[in-house]
Image (spheres, rainbow, N blue to C red):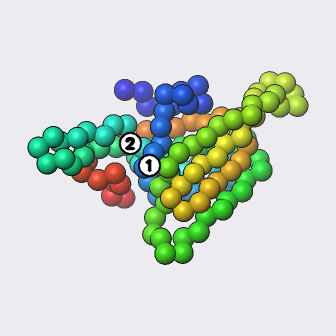
Amino acid sequence: MKKEWTEEDFDIMGWHDSYVHSISFPNQELNLTFDIDYIFDWVLNNENNLYSFWVSPCYFTFKNVTDLRLNIDFQDYVGLHIDNIERHSPYLTPNGKLFLWSYKIISNIGEITFKSTGYIMKLKKLPLLSKSQVLPR
């Protein structure tokens, strides 16, 4: 199992139901980091029709983030999970060395949009089989 995933893996990854424990906003390094529980697989138990999940805690860091916008409303909600991540409109940075992508993180309570040159998702631990999509911290 890989322990690091990057923007080159985007088309084979899916973040649906990944729980967000915390967000670290860009500083002088321009990194936007999410502490998430990434779900690698849903396992259906045919006897009781309930799912178990292969889940791993991860740091999910976007690099060279600009134009960050948050439209999130926690009214009547507790918790933040990702429904989907969209990526589109790549263009070369002014120095011609990197592509800058537009990202949209769609969640259960709003959207986060920004531009970034890519990401790295690092596993903090190998996946565990869990009855919950959210691992205790």
- Can residue 131 be seen here? The reply is yes
Q: Amino acid at mark 1?
A: Ser
The answer to which of 29 and 78 lies nearer the viewer is 78
Residue 17 left/right relative to 30: left
The answer to which of 93 and 122 lies nearer the viewer is 93
Q: Please report the residue visible at 69 percent of the width from the left and 35 percent of the height from the top.
A: 88
Label drawn at residue 18: 1
Query: Element at badge 2?
Result: strand
In whole angstroms, how far apart are the C-alphas of marks 1 and 2? Answer: 6 Å
Q: Quadrant of the C terminus?
A: bottom left
Q: Are the residues flagged by discs 1 and 2 in contact, CB closer than 8 Å? A: yes
In the picture, residue 123 is in which quadrant?
A: top left
The answer to which of 77 and 119 lies nearer the viewer is 77
**x then y, percent, for residue 95:** 87, 28
Q: Please report the residue visible at 57 percent of the width from the left and 51 percent of the height from the top.
A: 106
- Return the residue at label 2: 39
Residue 6 left/right relative to 47: right
Q: Amino acid at mark 2?
A: Ile
Mark 2: few/some/many CA within 10 Å (<14, 14-19, 20+): many
**x then y, percent, for residue 24:** 60, 56
